């Protein structure tokens, strides 16, 4: 009764040939029962929304359709079902395109799709989509669909849906559903579970991590799972890689979703063998009564120019050009003007590039003229009238629109979650029979602290891994260690106050610490550090991908016995 689910995409634009790799790897039958693909992210919804403004028939991930030119035949030969959220804003349109493709290829592929997530985009929003669960996917598979495409479902729904179909789970089998949610969360970002973006990458052969394979989850009827990958593919699966992905873009002990609220603080990870990590013990609770809604809108227009400052007197050169540009902008100043001097220069450098610093200017405004022609004139007219060695990395363009992402909630009963079966029958998906409002989990007891002893001031990353990411305007930083002794130190040493000291950019923001003892992990959420979300590009690292690595590079007193 094991259900083998593989994933071939972690984002729109991921490795194109991963679909073929996953369908043909793993021995006879491709080794899979279901192949999933995650194509949607906050930024993707804005991109698809802009596509659909130009062409009402667009709005889905075109890459997926191209992958299916080969994938439909391979899946048919091997009996693999395909489930993907590539439908984006137009799952019906993608389903039609897939039917036409199957007919062209002479394949009897049955297509189902899930819709109802798209809500009226009011208040200037370009897109508004509720995050649906897996029940609509399960209904399509139960009706014989070979391929199911959806709009905005939760990333984990790509796994909970097939699991509900395969095992016949009811909507109140919370522990089983929660286990599938955790497995789905590990799979959703593809190779991040198999050694990609891994903090301890230097401990492994570079050839192993050069081209990581995509992950596979072996789900069992009790909700437990083993995370693995196809034999012979690159990368690795160990407790560390799985822990890192479990902490990615999550927060506290309760991980809410439309199917179930999974308790991340109950998950137990065990290395079962080479490239095999068992996840069990996951408990679940009734889902909340509301669904998360992601909304994107055009926030205005943005432009930037990067001035290169070479050699001596970098700060004086920066002051001069900044004053000159500010004077030029005084008559038609953009609503937001932001300067940042990045000291990449070195003294007595052996190359011109390493002798240079970068002065970055970013402007935003509702008026495209103020970020286009106004900035271009202000910057380029200084070419012969500013600091010695004046040049820029690229001439400023005309400016481009930027997006804003925010979230809201809506009662689940108000969202018309609908499964459209292969024969065209439309089946309303019922709301969960029971719900439970979210509440904080009491802080768990901390382990006994390590006895005091000599310490050494070294980077935190000498013993701790981290992974960080974005949720709208907020960021999370998950930090974990690998031994009980290290955990006894980390749980007491890395407080919110210490976190803010190590990352001064968070000092004025609300930071919340969540303790996950079974994972030997702390998960920090940083409210508002990303402004209005990734599409607004308000920060140097707009998705907070490297926030955890910055934290690992910071120096802290660590007991010598742990080093």
Image: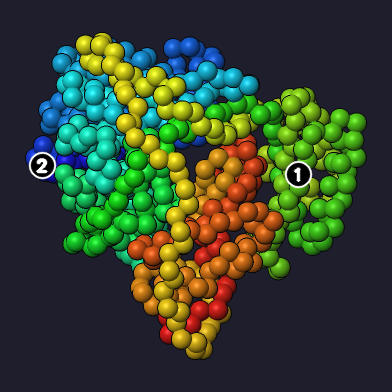
Q: Is residue 124 above or below residue 444?
A: above
Which mark lies nearer to you, 2 or 1? 2
The answer to whether 232 appears left or right of 291 in the picture is left
Q: Quadrant of the N terminus?
A: top left
Crowdedness of circle 2 by 10 Å Cα count: few (<14), some, many (20+)?
few
Residue drawn at point x = 61 percent, y = 31 percent = 403
Viewer-proximal residue, 509 or 35? Answer: 509
Residue drawn at point x = 50 percent, y = 49 percent = 469
| Secondary-structure class at tag 2 | loop
| Secondary-structure class at tag 1 | strand
Instruction: List the residue tagged with mark 1.
Output: 338
Number of numbered discs present? 2
Q: Quadrant of residue 68?
A: top left
Would residue 45 be seen by someone viewing this image from the given angle? no
Residue 271, percent from left and from top: 23, 63
Residue 90, percent from left and from top: 41, 18
Q: Is residue 494 above or below residue 379?
A: below
Crowdedness of circle 1 by 10 Å Cα count: few (<14), some, many (20+)?
few
Q: Quadrant of residue 376?
A: top right
Viewer-proximal residue, 81 or 133? Answer: 133
The answer to whether 79 appears left or right of 180 in the picture is left
Label 2 and label 1: CA atoms lie apart by 58 Å
- Tell me which label, 2 or 1, sits earlier in the chain: 2
Residue drawn at point x = 52 percent, y = 85 percent = 455
Residue 450, percent from left and from top: 44, 82
Say which mark, if any, is on residue 4: none
Q: Quadrant of the C terminus?
A: bottom left
Instruction: List the residue tagged with mark 2.
Output: 1
Residue drawn at point x = 82 percent, y = 41 percent = 383
């Amino acid at each position: 009764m094991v259900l083998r689910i593989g994933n071939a995409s972690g984002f729109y634009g991921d490795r194109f040939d991963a679909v073929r790799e996953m369908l043909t790897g793993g021995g006879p039958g491709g080794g899979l029962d279901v192949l999933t693909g995650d194509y949607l992210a906050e930024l993707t919804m804005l991109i698809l929304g802009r596509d659909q403004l130009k062409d009402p028939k667009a709005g889905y991930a075109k890459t997926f359709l191209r992958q299916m030119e080969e994938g439909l035949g391979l899946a048919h030969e091997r009996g693999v079902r395909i489930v993907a959220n590539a439908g984006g804003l137009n799952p019906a349109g993608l389903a039609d395109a897939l039917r036409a493709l199957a007919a062209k290829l002479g394949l009897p592929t049955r297509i189902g799709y899930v819709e109802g997530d798209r809500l009226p985009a009011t208040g200037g929003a370009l897109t508004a989509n509720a995050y649906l669960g897996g029940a609509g996917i399960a209904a399509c598979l139960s009706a014989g669909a070979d391929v199911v495409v959806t709009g905005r479902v939760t990333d984990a729904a790509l796994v909970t849906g097939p699991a509900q179909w395969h095992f016949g789970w009811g909507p109140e089998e919370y522990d089983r559903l929660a286990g599938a949610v955790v497995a789905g969360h590990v799979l959703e970002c593809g190779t991040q579970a198999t050694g990609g973006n891994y903090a301890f990458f230097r401990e492994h052969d570079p050839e192993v991590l050069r081209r990581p394979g995509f992950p596979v989850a072996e789900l069992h009827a009790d909700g437990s799972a083993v995370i693995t990958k196809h034999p012979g593919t690159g990368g690795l699966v160990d407790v560390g890689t799985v822990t890192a992905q479990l902490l990615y873009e999550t927060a506290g002990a309760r991980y809410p979703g439309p199917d179930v609220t999974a308790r991340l603080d109950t998950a137990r990870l065990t290395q079962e063998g080479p490239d095999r990590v068992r996840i069990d013990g996951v408990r679940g609770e009734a889902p909340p009564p509301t669904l998360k809604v992601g909304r994107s809108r055009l926030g205005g227009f943005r432009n930037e120019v990067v001035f290169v400052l070479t050699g001596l007197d970098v700060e004086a050169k920066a002051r001069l050009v900044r004053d000159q540009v500010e004077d030029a902008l005084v008559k038609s100043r953009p609503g937001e003007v932001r300067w940042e001097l990045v000291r990449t220069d070195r003294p007595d450098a052996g190359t011109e590039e390493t002798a240079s610093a970068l002065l970055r200017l970013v402007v935003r405004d509702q008026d495209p003229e103020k970020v286009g022609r106004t900035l271009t004139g202000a910057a380029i007219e200084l070419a012969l009238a500013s600091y010695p060695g004046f040049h820029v990395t690229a001439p400023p363009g005309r400016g481009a629109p930027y997006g804003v992402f925010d979230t809201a909630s809506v009662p689940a009963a108000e969202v018309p979650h609908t499964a459209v079966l292969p024969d065209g029958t439309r089946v309303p998906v019922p709301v969960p029979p029971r719900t439970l409002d979210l509440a904080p989990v009491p802080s768990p007891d901390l382990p006994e602290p390590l006895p005091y002893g000599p310490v050494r001031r070294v980077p935190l990353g000498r013993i701790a891994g981290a992974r960080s990411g974005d949720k709208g305007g907020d960021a999370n930083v998950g930090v974990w260690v690998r031994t009980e002794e290290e955990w006894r130190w980390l749980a007491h040493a890395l407080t919110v106050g210490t976190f803010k000291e190590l990352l001064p950019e968070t000092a004025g923001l609300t930071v919340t610490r969540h303790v996950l003892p079974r994972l030997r992990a702390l998960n920090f959420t940083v409210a508002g550090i990303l402004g209005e979300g990734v599409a607004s590009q308000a920060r140097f690292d707009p998705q907070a991908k490297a926030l955890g690595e910055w934290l690992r590079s910071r120096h802290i007193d660590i007991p010598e016995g742990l080093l």
